[in-house]
Image (cartoon, rainbow, N blue to C red):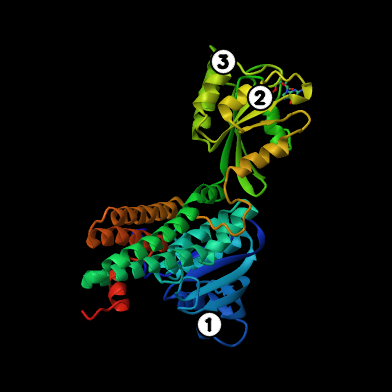
């Protein structure tokens, strides 16, 4: 039993296409018995058994219920033999007609013949375990499927092609080379000083490269999960009108009655390639009204949890003491002051005063006319460094970011130790940590391998 609760040696089966009616549905079977099981389910039209199909060949057949001899559906069979398949195991894919009942029926036949239901992600997990893909690529598979904007898709596609993993492996092998250099220095103490400045320069270069990718972590995570952007502000300042304008549709109720919005409204949208989850909230104010008070609580919680706060100010009213309080509270956050109702030309919001609190993080808009709305979207998009840069490869998961950060810590520590004149073994330890963290990112084991590589590359006669 593996940690997912299913045997790794079992043959697994699942419907690979979405639930519902469609042109075709695909039932995927993977494992040692894939051909044997599929062979009992499908009678090929040409006079050969499914088990005899060549790898990477395709054939027309009928799915037949063994017990009754009834034909369930006409199908196309794709045969892929180990190790040249997605999972690295024998895989048979049966394309049947895309009705839910049809696909379920075909799947149930596979179960009756000994396949076990695949667990979530198990085909990809097997692909990783069988060395078909690295861990970061496995994560990218999921990112591809769930990507909600083109920018997210392109990032995931690059990670799926192994671009991040390849970069990480290059960093790792540079560290391994450095380790070899240092280990060599242990054997030849007279070369140590010349070696140290060289090692320092190489480490700084490596640090800067890794750091550039770590800095794009917010972008990578934003693309994977969407950026939560939360509209907050006092009642009646125009939040819901902005919510609608930003979504280009009438989603939220807008009235001149303060306290109209109660619950937090969430809608997904896309701003110049950035996938956004936009939140509209109840106006922040003290209130005795129970439902509204709960709404205000939720508004604050939503603001705290979101990635970007849009603090809305009413240009017909100016900046009140309450506004000052919130703006100051969120000044260190990704908070943009949004001055709305500018179409009424009152100019009560003093921009100089606003700049004192927010610097250049403000924008003038109108929810009524749409003025400044695109500017607002662009300002939020620009908070995510590298979003418009096709060269900027970003990590796609918190796990990857964690590995990179730990690698960076190890390298920083090694640099410090070098400056402080610590002994080589301390530096070696820090660099091994860094290499280990990078190996975790791609899913390879860290332990003995690092050492093996050092000695196989840099043998100084030991
Ligand atoms: N002229 C003008 N009126 C606006 C604008 N935004 C909101 N309003 C009006 O201000 C009132 C409150 O708007 P609403 O969006 O519900 O504010 P909320 O309570 O902050 O969500 C409504 O009567 C809106 O029609 C704007 O940009 N221009
Ligand atoms: Mg509202």
Q: Earlier in the sequence, mark 1 or mark 2?
A: 1
**Which quadrant of the view contains residue 366?**
top right
Q: How far, Cα to Cα, is label 2 from label 3?
A: 15 Å
Expressed as whole percent of the image width and height from the top left, the position of residue 443 reads 39, 63
Q: How far, Cα to Cα, is label 1 from label 3?
A: 73 Å
**Where does label 1 land, which residue?**
55
Determine the residue located farthest toward the bottom in the rendered image: 47
For marks 2 and 3, give the one nearer the viewer: 2
For marks 1 and 2, give the one nearer the viewer: 2
Q: Secondary structure at mark 1?
A: loop
Ligand 2 appears in which quadrant?
top right
Identify the mark at residue 271; answer none if there is no mark: none
Left or right relative to 434: residue 111? right
Expressed as whole percent of the image width and height from the top left, the position of residue 65 reads 54, 71
**Where does label 3 land, which residue?**
321
Is there a contact, CB below 8 Å, between mark 1 and mark 2? no
Determine the residue positioned at 56% across, 59% down: 156
Nearer-the-camera pick, 375 or 396:
375
- Rate crowding at label 3 as few (under 14), some (14 to 19) or many (20 or more) other CA atoms within 10 Å: few
Is residue 7 visible in this depiction of the protein?
A: no
On the rendered image, what quadrant is the C terminus found in?
bottom left
Is there a contact, CB below 8 Å, between mark 2 and mark 3? no
Nearer-the-camera pick, 282 or 93:
282
Determine the residue positioned at 53% across, 18% down: 293
Identify the mark at residue 351; answer none if there is no mark: 2
Reply above or below: 31 against 388. below
For marks 1 and 3, give the one nearer the viewer: 3
Q: Earlier in the sequence, mark 1 or mark 3?
A: 1
Is residue 436 visible in this depiction of the protein?
A: yes
Q: Earlier in the sequence, mark 2 or mark 3?
A: 3
Whether the residue under disc 3 has CB within 8 Å of ligand 1: no
């Amino acid at each position: 039993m593996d940690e997912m609760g299913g045997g790794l040696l079992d043959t697994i089966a699942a419907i690979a296409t979405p639930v519902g009616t469609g042109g075709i549905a695909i039932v995927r079977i993977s494992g040692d018995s894939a051909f044997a099981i599929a062979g009992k389910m499908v009678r090929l039209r040409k006079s050969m058994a499914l088990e005899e199909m060549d790898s990477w060949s395709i054939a027309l057949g009928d799915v037949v219920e063994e017990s009754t001899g009834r034909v369930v559906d006409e199908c196309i069979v794709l045969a892929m033999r180990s190790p040249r398949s997605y999972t690295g195991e024998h895989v048979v894919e049966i394309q049947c007609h895309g009705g839910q009942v049809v696909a379920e029926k075909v799947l149930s036949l596979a179960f009756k013949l000994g396949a076990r239901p695949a667990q979530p992600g198990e085909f990809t997990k097997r692909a990783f375990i069988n060395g078909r893909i690295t861990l970061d690529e496995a994560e990218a598979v999921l990112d591809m499927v769930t990507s909600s904007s083109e920018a997210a898709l392109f990032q995931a596609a690059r990670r799926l092609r192994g671009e991040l993993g390849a970069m990480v492996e290059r960093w790792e092998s540079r560290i391994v080379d450095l380790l070899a250099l240092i280990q060599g220095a242990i054997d030849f103490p007279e070369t140590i000083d010349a070696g140290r400045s060289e090692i320092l320069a190489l480490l700084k270069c490596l640090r800067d490269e890794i750091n550039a990718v770590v800095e794009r972590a917010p972008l990578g995570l934003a693309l994977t999960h969407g950026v939560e952007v939360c509209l907050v502000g006092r009642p009646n300042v125009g939040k819901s009108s902005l919510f609608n304008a930003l979504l280009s549709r009438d989603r939220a109720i807008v009235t001149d009655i303060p306290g109209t919005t109660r619950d937090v409204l969430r809608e997904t949208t896309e701003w110049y390639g950035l996938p956004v989850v936009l939140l509209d909230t109840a106006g922040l104010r003290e209130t005795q009204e129970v439902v509204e008070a709960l709404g205000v609580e939720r508004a604050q919680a939503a603001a705290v949890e979101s990635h970007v706060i849009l603090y809305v100010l009413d240009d017909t009213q100016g900046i009140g003491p309450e506004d000052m309080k919130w703006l100051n509270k969120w000044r260190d956050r990704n908070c943009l002051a949004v001055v709305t109702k500018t179409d009424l030309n009152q100019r009560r919001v003093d921009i100089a005063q606003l700049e004192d609190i927010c610097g250049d993080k403000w924008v003038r808009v109108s929810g009524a006319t749409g003025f400044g709305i695109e500017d607002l979207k662009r300002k939020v998009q620009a908070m995510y460094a590298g979003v418009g840069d096709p060269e900027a490869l970003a990590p796609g998961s918190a796990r990857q970011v964690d590995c990179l950060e730990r690698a960076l810590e190890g390298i920083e520590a090694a640099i410090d130790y070098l400056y402080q004149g610590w002994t080589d073994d301390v530096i070696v330890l820090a660099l091994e940590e860094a290499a280990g963290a990078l190996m975790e990112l791609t899913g390879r084991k860290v332990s003995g391998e690092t050492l093996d590589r050092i000695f196989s590359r840099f043998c100084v006669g030991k």
